[in-house]
Amino acid sequence: MSLDYRKTLESLQRLNSSLVDGKPLNHLFLHDNYDFWGIYQMSLFSDLKRISGKDTAVKKYFGGVKDFLLKSFLLLESLFAILLKKPDIFLFALDKTSSSIAMNDSRMDDVYRFLKKENISYVEIMHTIPSRQTIKNFIKRKRLVIYLESFSFFLSQRHLDGIEPLVAKYDYRFSLSKRLIKLFTFLFKWKHPKALWGIDDTRNIHELVIAAKKANLVSYLFQHGHFTKYHVGWLKYNGQIGRMPNADHLVVWNEYWKKELIDLGTYYPEDAIMVGGSKYLEKQNTAVPEKISVIIPYETDAPKNEVRGYIEKMNNEGFNVYLKIRKDISTEKQIEEYGGKNCVIAVESFVPAHACLGVYSSFLYDVIGIYPVGLLKTSMDYGYGMVKNQLAKEIVLDIPIMEQIKNMKISSFGDQKVLLYDTLFDITKKCGIL
């Protein structure tokens, strides 16, 4: 199912301007002069996107006794992690095991690779969606972590009369946020780590950043994907009140992303955005093949019916169309959504190709400097910044694809003067770890 990001953004802007009892809605979410309604912008956008996609079902993985046992496990495991560990770094992460470096989220490979090589002690504070997968990931990981969700176990939800269910959900989260801040402020002061590091996931990190500030603990967040006008968790919004809890340092891949984030209207001060170096990408065999070939990444929210139109046209023109699949979604499902085995060839990594084509995903930015990149023109404008900034060429359906890609050139972000490993080494020295 494709989603309309523009309508979702408009819905969020309307919600942001709502009044409750004659007062702006965000005034209900002000605490310690922090604007928690602003903190929740990315989560709100995700909820509104889900609702606009007609997906209103709440997934239940467990119930009754099983639910109680799962939550009890998360709480006890987190308490053991707190009691038994005294790390140099608390590391905020997401509960994914897509990388073999440390059974970690592959988007943080550079950080885990560095910590492992330099033998730096860390404990993860992890966001999970409590389910069977949580247990499976714990078994794969084979180490103690602190689960953010474990501390909502005994928190009862209070209700505000006369407001929409979505707002009531965030009123509950507001109560939880204040308790999490108190808990982690105490934890940081007790354990005396040297720093808080983390993935820049703005749906779940802000409480930890505020706690770090209260505990005088320096914080570093690391860019994990591209920034657009739809990444509202990094941006100011109309009617914002109070402060937004930016980390002390946001480490981005290069000068391009620092400028882009500032141009989009981030609440991060310019001097808090560090150019830290690009993600690590292993060298791949990307020599141009004899047969005209393109690689297309699987994109969760792309308008698949429109993309299939491009794939059909390329099939008719004699292309090899490679589909770069994701590890966290069934391969069969991805192939089927992109037209089936007769239309695409599933691959897990880079392959020799004349170009990489897609709609919006971070993969299109990852391959800058490796392939020429084309942005498929569809009803979704999520990735249009690549065309605006001359990183990609717009591809349209009413002109032969062969003709459009034959003269495409490989673009670049400019000279990469900073290596992320060197940045991480400098950060650990500043924090007194190395």
Image (tube, rainbow, N blue to C red):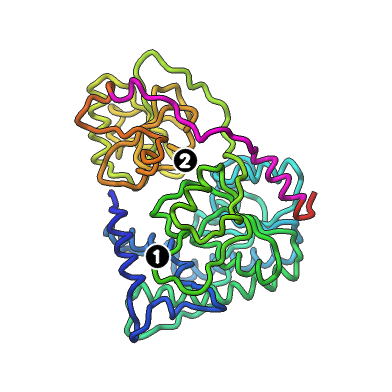
Which residue was labeled with disc 1? Answer: 44
Q: Position of residue 346 (x, y in %)?
A: 39, 30
What element does badge 1 sit on? helix
Three-letter code, disc 2: Lys
Residue 411 appears left or right of 50:
right
Front-lying residue, 338 or 405: 405
Please give the name of the residue rendered at 69% of the width and 61% of the height, measured from the top-left corner: 218
Q: Where is residue 158 in the image (x, y as percent from the top left)?
A: 44, 83
Which residue was labeled with disc 2? Answer: 327
Residue 106 appears left or right of 420:
left
- Badge 1: how crowded within 10 Å, few (<14), some, or many (20+)? many
Q: How many marks?
A: 2
Q: Position of residue 304 (x, y in %)?
A: 28, 41
Q: Please determine whether, in this image, residue 311 is positioned above or below residue 215.
A: above
Three-letter code, disc 1: Leu
Say which quarter of the image contains residue 43: bottom left
- Is residue 130 something one can see in this rendering? no
Q: Magenta span has 421?
A: yes
Q: Magenta span has 213?
A: no
What element does badge 2 sit on? loop
Say which quarter of the image contains residue 219: bottom right
Real-space CA distance between mark 1 and mark 2, rounded to the nearest whole angstrom:
27 Å
Front-lying residue, 77 or 382: 382
Residue 160 appears left or right of 173:
left
Q: Position of residue 379 (x, y in %)?
A: 25, 45
Mark 1 or 2, nearer chain start: 1
Q: Give the range drawn in magenta.
A: 404-429
Q: Which residue lies furthest to the top in this view?
A: 290
Front-lying residue, 201 or 125: 201
